[in-house]
Amino acid sequence: MVPFVTVVGVGIDLVDLERIRRLLANKGEHAMTRFFSDSERQYLATRPDATGHAAARIAAKEAVYKAMQALPGARGVGWREIEVSRDEEGRPAIRLHGLAAQVSEESGGLQIKISLTHSAVSAGAIAIVEAP
């Protein structure tokens, strides 16, 4: 039997790769530290062309942010407080830090499902936030 959960919110975002390519070229390390955690930056550094991967992660962060907006206090969540990682099986996963983690705790512990995609021109993500 599947346990019942409450869907708190659904978020979706689409990012233009050329915009991210320009951002990374013009702002470099400043943009990387503004948007990404240390572990995300380490992952992106392993990619020959990190643009698509960076764009997908920015889309994921925005999608999670949008999905959390029904929760009290979620508007103050920052970029690095939503971290894109991988689960044990290599699938994209979300780790929450700082205020995002606090909002999750106060909501009884959120479960976040995420799906990422990117093509030669855009990257997208959809997030579903569930509460127990």
Image (tube, grey):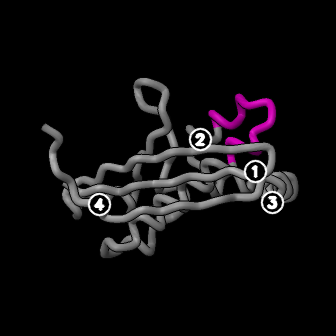
| Residue named by callout 2 | 40
Disc 1 vs disc 3: Cβ atoms closer than 8 Å?
A: no
| Residue named by callout 4 | 7
| Residue named by callout 3 | 19
Q: Could you tell me residue 97's position as x and y percent?
A: 41, 53
What residue appears at the point 85 percent right and 57 percent down from the top-left corner?
Answer: 22
**What's under tag 2, amino acid-wise?**
Glu
Say whether residue 36 is left or right of residue 108: right
Q: Is mark 4 on a helix, strand or loop?
A: strand
Disc 3 vs disc 4: Cβ atoms closer than 8 Å?
A: no
Say whether residue 4 is left or right of residue 64: left
The magenta-colored residue range is: 42-54
| Residue named by callout 1 | 29
* Number of other residues with Cα within 10 Å of mark 3, as a class: few under 14, some 14 to 19, many 20 or more: some
Disc 3 or disc 4, which is closer to the eye? 4
Disc 4 vs disc 2: Cβ atoms closer than 8 Å?
A: no
Say whether residue 90 is left or right of residue 40: left
Q: Work out how far the residue at label 2 is from the one at label 3, CA to CA, in angstroms.
A: 19 Å
Quarter of the figure that contains the N terminus: top left
Q: Work out how far the residue at label 4 is from the one at label 2, CA to CA, in angstroms.
A: 27 Å
Disc 2 vs disc 1: Cβ atoms closer than 8 Å?
A: no
Mark positioned earlier in the residue sequence (1 or 3)? 3
Q: Work out how far the residue at label 2 is from the one at label 1, CA to CA, in angstroms.
A: 13 Å
Mark positioned earlier in the residue sequence (4 or 1)? 4
